[in-house]
Image (cartoon, rainbow, N blue to C red):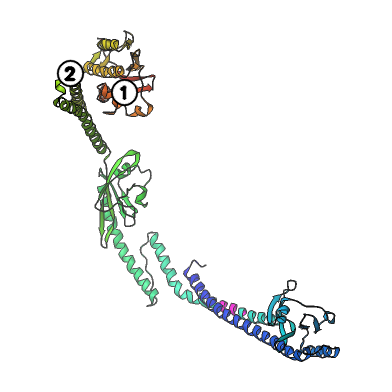
Amino acid sequence: MFRSIRGKLVLIYLLLILFAMQLIGVYFIRSVNSYFLGNFSTTVNTQARFISGQMERYMEKEITPDTVKDIDNLIASFASAESEIYVLNKTGTILSTSVDRSYVGQKRLRTEVTRALLGTKDEVIREDAQTGQRYTFLAVPVKNGSEVVGAVYMIAPMTKIYKTIKEINMMFYTGLLIALAMTAILGVALARTITNPIVEITKKAKAMARGDFNQVVHVRSDDEIGQLGETFNFLIQRLKGALSENEQEREKLEAILTHLSDGVIAVDSSNQILLINPAAKLLLDCQEDPVGQPISQLLIIDEESDSSGSLLAGREMQFKGPKGRILQAYASPIRGEQGNTGLVIVIRDKTEEEREEQARRDFVANVSHEIRTPLTTIKSYLEALEDGAVEDSVLRTRFLQVIHNETDRMVRMVGELLHLSKLDAGKMQWSFTPVNLVQILDDVADRFAFQCRQQEISLFVDTTSSLPNVCADPDKLDQVLDNLVSNAIKHTPPKGMIRLEAASAQDVMQVKVVDSGMGIPPQDLPRIFERFYRVDKARSRKLGGTGLGLSIAKQIIEAHGGTIRIESVVDQGTTVIFTLPLAKEGIA
């Protein structure tokens, strides 16, 4: 009921009446309580003070039976059927009472009595724990001059007082309930006059929501409700025209966006997606239609975005998309009659461009570093020669040998860089012919046999003579094997072993270069084919390595249509495995 305007209006009326009556009730009830309780307290105190005043003439002399009799008659004239009056001497002994005479002679030393015997009047209200009734306990001192000679102690029940107050409260609450009921009835009648036109407008609006725009609200008054009806009728006419224009624009926009290669997303002023073209769905890997969702669920915006989570209009920004894509987004405002009403976001896939740019930056940095090292060495040794080392034949010979070695290393590095440049640019000349792999392996072993004997390394070929030919460029294949065997020799200690293996498997030839060297740590294996990457940089430079051999070998093998990988265990050796396609012709 209270979800409707009618119910809310009635509730407001009831709450207003209830609030007003509560304020009046609090004041009224407090006033009634204060009046009756104050009047009762005044009556009891008046009686107690009067009796106390009369007791002075009895207490100033010796208490005799006649005196006690006079005191009994006095308090009997003031005591009611329910109240109790006690007269006590200065020791707290009861001299007379209006109730049971057996109390006479006993001591009554309650807190009120003790304070009264000390000269202070004390009044307190207590509730009986068994009956729940309240009593006023009043003790008034009896003085002879400034000396306290006794006390008057009264116990007066307050049942009638509280009963009277309760009856008055019940009368007030009954009137309150009657007022609330009448207010509710009048509120419902009044609310209907306000809510009936609103209910009619609501029904018309629901019909419009279902697609029926032929609705007219009947205006019956000139008040705010009537103005609402007129505005609603005007809104219907404007809405019909806007929907027609919007439909035409939407059809045009869909035709354009469908054929764009870039991703396009349109969002409204609250960052809700209005439309998205197929290219954007593909770039953002949308499994469902995201129209109507917040743009933040699709785009991962970095710290340059504004507080609402959308792109800043007119600014390009880059962010990570699904599946590791690097996307670039540009936002342009949608301008309507009332200013910016949203954004159009254009998204481009910059993954390949970014990877190429990063590779270029890394390559330039690595080349600069690798060239600077030998140049620094050459410069330092030349300066040493200029400073007088040229006069020492031993130093001169050693320094010139170092300069010669570093120059050779730079020449090899430049040659390998030119080789890589040709591979990257696709300008390398290839001559693919059927190649006898066994002969190639034997030739490689012969070339490195002397070097292996000098370093006490065993080098042999483990294969059969009946292997089929492979389709390869002989010179490039020689270069790959030279790089791999040279690396194996550099990293294999004396008494070690290097083995060249080849075996056909399905439609490819599998070649292995196995050594018993120091091996490669597991954390370095994923990066071993990167340009200029070395596992042991200091030892690699000492041995004349440039860090490009494996990268060149990988590109040559992949250009042949094969694959290459490395398996290694630290201190146990390394195995380089690559594959080559078999030649369609027979053995040459």
Q: Is residue 178 magenta?
A: yes
Q: Earlier in the sequence, mark 2 or mark 1?
A: 2
Residue bearing the label numbered 1: 563
Q: Which amino acid is tagged 1?
A: Thr
**Looking at this view, is 496 or 231 the one in front?**
496
Residue bearing the label numbered 2: 397
The image quadrant of residue 198 is bottom left
Examine the residues drawn in magenta and state their main secondary structure: helix
Q: Is residue 586 visible?
A: no
Q: Quadrant of the C terminus?
A: top left
> Which range is magenta?
174-181
Task: Say what secondary structure mark 2 lies in.
Answer: helix
Left or right: where 479 falls relative to 168: left
Label 2: how many Cα within 10 Å (few below 14, some 14–19, many 20+): few
x and y percentages locating residue 66 in the rendered image: 85, 91
Q: Is residue 197 visible?
A: yes
The image quadrant of residue 152 is bottom right
Q: Is residue 438 magenta?
A: no
